[in-house]
Image (cartoon, rainbow, N blue to C red):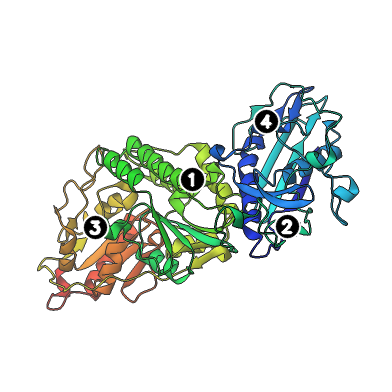
Amino acid sequence: MVVEKRSPLWGEPSAAEFSLTAGKVENLRRAARAFHGLEVPAGAVLSFWRQLGRPVRWRGFVAGRELREGCVIPAVGGGLCQLSGLLYQAALEAGLEIAERHAHSRILPGSSAEQGLDATVFWNYVDLRLRSGQPWRLEVTLTGSELVVRIYRAAVSGTGPEKSRAAAPPVPVPVPDSLSAASKSAAGSPETHAAGDCLTCGMTECFRHPAATASHAPALGHTAFLLDARWPEFDAWCAAHSREGDHWLIPMNGRRWKKSNYAWTPAPGIRLRCATAVTLLRSFRQRRLPAQGAVRQAALLAGESAIARWYARHLSPECRHIVVSQNLLPHLWRTGALAGRTFDVLMQRWPLAELQRRLDLALAAHPGSSTLGDFRADPALIQAENEALAAAGRLITPHRAMAAFFGFRSWLIDWQFPAPLTRAPSARPTVFFPASRLARKGVHELAAALRQMPEVTAKVPGRAAESGPDPLAGIFWTPATPPELASAWAVVIPAWVEHQPRPALQALASGIPVIATASCGLPEHPLLHVLAAPDGLCLTTVLRGVLRMHPPSGAKPAAVT
């Protein structure tokens, strides 16, 4: 048996009321982490306060809407009775025993309190306590617009994104008979809107009014851009879709530190925050990692997790929408920071599940590779990413293959072509392989083609390699530097996985033909020749044709046999 109850998070608050509404959602966001995935044994009592603990600032709770003595006032932890009320409604429908429950003192027409379906809580003596003769499971989540409570009457282990936890043992909570109705009233039911709202009642001399203690600047929320490595396409998109008052959280100020990969360019009026210390520590650790292997991949994920946790701690409760770099997405999802917010994703790579599926296909084709199967992500992280992507709004990418993969949910943006090179083609037919000698980049397919074309030289700029036999053994190739792209007759990248094909874009901009798999995600171009999949035989045929059709100025087509 499954019971589900929902209630709106935001409603339509005025500018003056918005900060308290945002505070309420932040408090619900934090409370949801304490209750989600909870499995309660048969006969055990679930106490709202025993499970949640005291809602204080040092635990991340903020000022939210609280109903006290007939007024909606700002109070730390305000708004939690939206959760207690919804939990009470779900418990009634699921047939749980209500060991303790208290109604609000003020009943508004049309509210859940009018129907006897509310449950107020007030630390630490006004509680909601539930019991059942059967085991049951509780799930509490926040979508971009709703609070959702689900009760499963039988324990179902492993169905939630977090490890299940046992409920605390029953603890008696005394409730004095003399407790007044006014003092029992507590915060934040979405149906509770008093006429004397603390932010709009005009009683600015009241000690509870924010104007009496601090300056108050009403706002209807902002977008936070949670960014990692800079792509020029994403930089331009974010700048075009920001508005004054938005927040950009970036690893570090790349322009000040002369780090081009972090040199984001926020528009005027943007509040910029930098996770500089966390980023420097991540860079320090990465410099000591091997070029390839499971140790490196695990460390990269750990570094992304550290950045994501820093971002989560520095999000304002008034952030209602997020634009997030994809590599940070599963880590942010696990912190709960995306709950109660809408969000879009800057797609920098394949989802982990799809990425690993593609690597498995490559491993089946090249079982001797030392890198294709050396690392697989934690299944819990993959599940978190899948859940986050399912909840996301728009998936923004310039990568054509990824955009096609996600269909109507994708927002395809244009690749930015770099400045063209001045071509200086070599006398001998030369192909440029803009990657390291790794199986996922298509080095085995390149080797298969070049063994049929001994007159062609390969230039390879990447330094990483497979730990086994060199795939290019017996083939005429030379190490290269990126500027040597100008000497190439063609660029070849028959990759199984390629997320950011910058050299191929520069080649196309410079008038150099490119042969690439569809997995490279390149845009349509007269000089682009697309392979449906990595295949050495097909590459041989296409490469011969390209070198004959597009020889550099002054070269003889007959040079290619």
**What label does residue 258 carry, if any?**
3
Q: Circle 1 sits in a helix, a strand or a loop, which is it?
A: helix
Q: Earlier in the sequence, mark 1 or mark 4?
A: 4
Where's residue 63, x and y in %? 62, 48
Name the mark nearer the viewer: 1 or 3: 1
Of residues 435 and 161, which is closer to you in this image?
161
Tell me what residue is drawn at x 32 percent, y 42 percent. Answer: 282
Q: Earlier in the sequence, mark 2 or mark 3?
A: 2
Of residues 249 and 331, which is closer to you in this image?
249
Q: Circle 2 sits in a helix, a strand or a loop, which is it?
A: strand
Q: Earlier in the sequence, mark 2 or mark 1?
A: 2
- List the residue tagged with mark 2: 197
Callout 3: few (<14), some (14-19), or many (20+) C-alpha neighbours within 10 Å? few
Where's residue 343, x and y in %? 55, 57
Q: Are marks 4 and 3 in contact (CB under 8 Å)?
A: no
Of residues 128 and 107, which is closer to you in this image?
107
CA distance for labels 2 and 1: 29 Å
Is residue 373 something that shows in the picture? Answer: no
Where's residue 227, x and y in %? 42, 56
Q: Are marks 2 and 3 in contact (CB under 8 Å)?
A: no
Name the mark nearer the viewer: 2 or 1: 2
Placement of 209 over or under 299, stated as above or below: below
Q: Residue furthest right?
A: 115
> On the rendered structure, is 534 left or right of 39?
left
Callout 4: few (<14), some (14-19), or many (20+) C-alpha neighbours within 10 Å? some
CA distance for labels 2 and 3: 50 Å
**What label does residue 313 carry, if any?**
1
CA distance for labels 4 and 3: 48 Å
Q: Amino acid type of disc 4?
A: Gln
